[in-house]
Image (spheres, grey):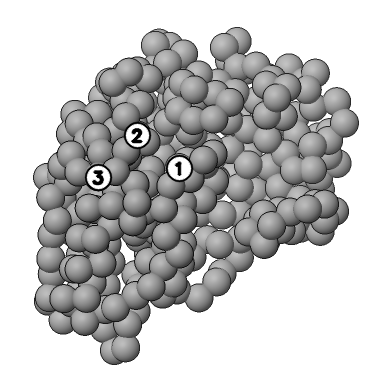
Amino acid sequence: MALRTAAWPALPLDPWRDTYATLHMWTQIVGKVCLALTPLTNHYWNIAFQVTPVGLTTPVMYHGDRSFQITFDFQDHVLRFCVSDGGDRTLKLEPQTVADFYARVMAVLRDLGIPVRIWTMPVEIPDPIRFTEDVIHRSYEPEQAHAFWSALTLMKPVFENFRCGFLGKCSPVHFFWGSFDLAVTRFSGKRAPERPGADRMTSEAYSHEVISHGFWPGSGAVQEAAFYAYAAPPPEGIAEARVEPAAASWNTEMGEFILPYEAVRRSGDPEAALEAFLNTTYDASARLAGWDREELERRRA
């Protein structure tokens, strides 16, 4: 894969943290509109966003005989509503509470003749606050949002190239607004054991054996921006597997391999460092899990 010359942007926890927390809630509001208006596909892939040349966008949604799409534009810093009949709208992305953002999004949809009801409780975060009541998260720094999107545009081709080596069932490279991560997931084709106490979404997501890779811009047990890799169910011995690059390590609390984004960014070749992480963590997981690699992988010339 040809090297890209653009510098990978820094994503320091401060000042990115506050913009990240607010943007996470804003994307959940838009994502739940998608959840309400699209039919369920495998593992909730119908609700994931795509990285675009300007930001993050929903899949195409339908209302009656019209189609529409909502895009977070991190170049012009607006939320774009593009409708098939030309009734486009924009909302400025600027510091505002989650409650205000929710009210404005719903008002635009009503004005467009696309009324929709969503569950207003955020998901996949501790101590959630209803969108209608959240006046705590209100930060938006355009430079930080732009850096986040720029990082996604630089890493996505590496993930796409990695995805092409797999012939079995594989997800698109897409962005989940619940966990707020870029992800690509490979499947062995075998059913996975049911997870005790799993909710509906988790049961659907992990109905089959997977090896998943992705990127968090900072959250949960790993506060800094980082790449991750895991197998579900985890094969015996995976925690002791040797992977590359040297900055990658096994996180016992999460049960995943973690590679700090900053280590990739500062390496002499970020693309090669990320490729090594994707390939070696997959190789170790597939080998230990006993995947049928002859059937699932594209033969290299």
Cα separation between marks 2 and 3: 13 Å
Q: Nearer the viewer, mark 2 or mark 3?
A: 3
- Between 288 and 161, the one lying in front of the other is 288
Q: Quadrant of the N terminus?
A: top left
Position of residue 51 relative to residue 22, above or below, is below
Cα separation between marks 3 and 1: 19 Å
* Element carrying mark 2: helix
Q: Quadrant of the C terminus?
A: top right
- Choose the circle earlier in sequence order: 3 or 1: 3
Give amino acid for label 1: Phe
Image location (x, y in percent) of residue 119: 45, 64
Query: Contact (CB < 8 A) between labels 1 and 2?
Result: yes
Checking the image for residue 20, the label placed there is 2
Q: Quadrant of residue 69?
A: bottom left
* Element carrying mark 3: loop
Image location (x, y in percent) of residue 174: 46, 50
